[in-house]
Every structure is written in C-alpha cells, then in structure tokens.
C-alpha cells in the first residue's frame, strides 16, 4: 500500500493569508473566490473581513 501525498501545504502550521485569489463563481448577491496558494474556496467578503482583522491586530501590537 502506498501513502498518498498530503494535500495540505508544508507550512500548515501558519494559516494562509490568501495573497492571490481568483473568482470561481458569482451569484446574485455573492462572489466566491479560490486562493491560488492553498486552494481554499470562500466568499469574497470573507477575504475583506480577514484583511480588516489583520490590520486591527497589527495596530494593536504596535501600541
């Protein structure tokens, strides 16, 4: 029996920041994107929320 290669990236300990995405689907009120790095698919609005959270956390650490 052979082992399957892991579908998880090698740096699975550090969450992907989704630096490159592409649109995969659009519906009436939602747009879905896929990260070209980790292949996760999610709503585009979630990506905006992630970047807002990161900027708020970064400002809190600088203070």
Image (spheres, grey):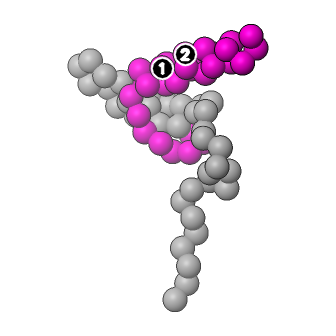
Is 30 part of what is drawn in magenta?
no
Is residue 42 shown left or right of residue 59? left
Magenta highlight range: 36-63
Q: Give the residue at the far left of this rendering.
A: 28
Question: Could you tell me which residue is drawn at 48 percent across and 20 percent down?
Answer: 49
Q: Is mark 1 on a helix, strand or loop?
A: helix
The quarter holding residue 36 reads top right
Magenta residues: mostly which secondary structure? helix
Q: Nearer the viewer, residue 59 or 39?
A: 59
Question: Could you tell me which residue is drawn at 65 percent across and 43 percent down?
Answer: 14
Is 38 part of what is drawn in magenta?
yes
Q: Which of 60 and 32 is in front in this view?
A: 60
Q: Do the residues labelled 2 and 1 touch (CB within 8 Å)?
A: yes
Q: Give the residue at the far bottom of this rendering.
A: 1
User: Mark 2 to mark 1: distance in Å?
Assistant: 5 Å
Residue 8 on image: x %, y %: 57, 56
Badge 2 is on which residue? 52
Question: Could you tell me which residue is drawn at 58 percent across and 69 percent down?
Answer: 5
Question: Could you tell me which residue is drawn at 55 percent across and 16 percent down?
Answer: 52
- Image disc number at residue 5: none
User: Which quadrant, please, contains the C terminus?
Assistant: top right
Using the image, determine if residue 16 lies above or below residue 62.
Answer: below
Is residue 21 shown left or right of residue 45? right
Is residue 3 shown left or right of residue 44? right
Query: Quick one: label 1, few (<14), some, or many (20+) residues within 10 Å?
Result: few
Residue 51 on image: x %, y %: 56, 20
Q: Which of 37 and 52 is in front in this view?
A: 52
Using the image, determine if residue 56 lies above or below residue 41.
Answer: above
Is residue 14 shown left or right of residue 49? right
Badge 1 is on which residue? 49
Q: Is mark 2 on a helix, strand or loop?
A: helix
Residue 61 on image: x %, y %: 72, 18
């Amino acid at each position: 029996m052979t082992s399957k290669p892991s579908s998880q990236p090698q740096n699975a300990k550090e969450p992907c920041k989704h630096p490159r995405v592409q649109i995969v689907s659009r519906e009436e009120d939602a747009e879905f994107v896929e990260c070209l790095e980790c292949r996760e698919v999610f709503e585009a609005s979630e990506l905006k929320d992630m970047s807002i959270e990161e900027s708020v956390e970064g400002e809190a650490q600088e203070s």
